[in-house]
Image (cartoon, rainbow, N blue to C red):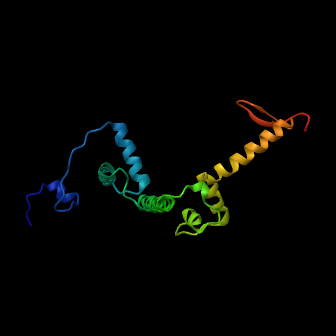
Amino acid sequence: MMTDRPQWEESMGLAEDSTQITFTCSKKEREIWSEEALEEGFSSRSKYLYVLIQEARVYRKHGTLADRSSEERIEELEAQVESMKRRLENEQGEPRFRRELSDPGYLELVLEETYKTLPEVLEEVVECGVLDNRVRKEIESGLYVMAGKNQVEYEPGWGWRLTDDTC
């Protein structure tokens, strides 16, 4: 069988639709790529570089490598976005600080389709700041009452502490 392909292509076992390209780099780079190819389990440096080029194309086109972990992360982020949209829809028209913590409407804001333990639910309530308005005013009032009785003192930049009289 006679083809138009050069003899060296046939002797290298290249597929019929394959061709060779010439790539110029430093000897040090060539050695590094050869070592990486071996470490990654590639039979040749050419195959390794081909895979790297394909990954770079995907990265350039999509901004991330198209591997399974990226897909899972995208799914996680999409679920978070949906959860945030649902929370925003539930919150519109009703200020957060007026809701009771046991209100089912409020609890729907911190729950999702995935299971959460009670400590996880509590952590989310604390992190979202819903308790700030409720607790802050009561604690500030208490601290000012205690300061009026010389039980605590405040130092700007440092905060509150018990007075020496109290200790």
Q: As drawn, is 101 to the left or to the right of 27?
A: right
Q: Residue at x 38, y 42 (%)?
A: 31
Q: As drawn, is 7 to the left or to the right of 50?
A: left
Residue 151 vertical position relative to residue 7 in the rendered view, above or below: above
Q: Residue at x 64, y 62 (%)?
A: 101
Q: In the depicted view, which residue is nearer to us: 132 or 60? A: 132
* Residue extending farthest top: 156
Q: If the image is split into quadrants, where does the C terminus sit?
A: top right
Query: Where residue 154 sits: x, y (%)?
Result: 77, 33
Q: Residue at x 67, y 52 (%)?
A: 134
Residue 51 vertical position relative to residue 107 in the rendered view, above or below: above
Image quadrant assignment for residue 18 = bottom left
Q: If the image is split into quadrants, where does the N terminus sit?
A: bottom left
Q: In the depicted view, which residue is nearer to us: 19 or 160? A: 160
Q: Residue at x 86, y 37 (%)?
A: 149
Query: Where residue 66 sits: x, y (%)?
Result: 36, 58
